Amino acid sequence: MTEFFHLMAAPFAACLVLTGIHAYLGLHVIERQVIFVDLALAQIAALGSTVGFLFGFGLHHSANYLFALGFTFLGAVIFSLTRFREEKVPHEAIIGVVYAVAAAAAILVLNRAAEGGEELKSLLVGHLLLARWSEVGKVAAIYGAIGALHWLARRPLLFISQKPQEAFARGMPVRLWDLFFYATFGFVVTSSVEMAGVLLVFSYLIVPAVCGVLLGRSIAQRLAIGWAIGALTSILGIAASYFWDLPTGAAVVCAFGVVLLAVFLAAHFRA
């Protein structure tokens, strides 16, 4: 057990950090009904990383991080400008198209680079097992700063997420708030994808938030439930990864699937 705690302490701390910010952002995503925006932004960040890789920077090089961040901010601008008061086309459809194009473009870019398949796999599953305490601390500081900004702007952000039509009617600068939301969201996703990969980041965003919506009534209840679910699932996934010798990221994603199924059953029988 001593070896287990020594090897898995940093990955578990990384999972807790991911849970803290992503469970909160997931509540906004569900209210906005843009479920795949995290996956799209994560894929855009991955596309930026592949472009940086093609220019000769390693996937974990600081310059490559700037490539990913720049591409993600571009995606944030696209998502904020395509939000209209009367949507003839659902915003989710535009997000889906952006995701598909970004994924295809990443494949085309990696096709021009040696060892492209391995780099694509790294972008999907990350390097959670190899996370270092310095890396966890850096990501925690970034998420803490973004969390503080969202706390200060919590009232307009939540109002726009829950009642967008009323926000437009009141004359609120909805697109500017959307740009703020998606830009800070993109900052989070870019940092998360570098460490945890696209699939795990999506799981941390959606599953705790869905569990919170199923079991809680108020925003505070849903957020508390989401944090608890994220922490519990992280423990289960990391333990399964260690004792059964499984890839850590994939094990945690599968653990999220099992926990979500259990929550669905619990909510059904409670109803």
Image (tube, helix red, strand yellow):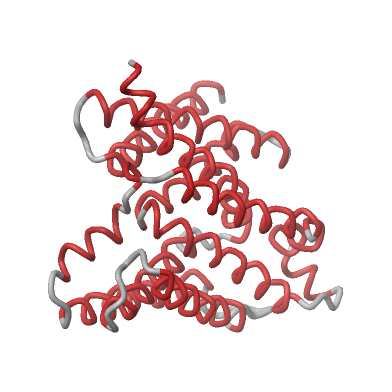
Q: Residue at x 67, y 72 (%)?
A: 178
Between 240 and 55, which is closer to the camera in this rendering? 55
Question: Does residue 121 appear to the left or right of 170 in the view shown?
Answer: left
The vertical placement of 164 against 151, above or below, is below
Between 268 and 92, which is closer to the camera in this rendering? 92
Give the percent coordinates (x, y) of residue 26.
56, 51
Q: Residue at x 82, y 75 (%)?
A: 172
Question: Does residue 17 appear to the left or right of 236 in the view shown?
Answer: right
Q: Quadrant of residue 64?
A: bottom left
The vertical placement of 81 against 189, above or below, is below
Q: Residue at x 38, y 49 (%)?
A: 200
Q: Quadrant of residue 54?
A: bottom left
The vertical placement of 182 against 143, above or below, is below
Q: Residue at x 35, y 75 (%)?
A: 47
Quadrant that contains the N terminus: top left
Give the percent coordinates (x, y) of residue 261.
39, 32
Quadrant that contains the C terminus: top right
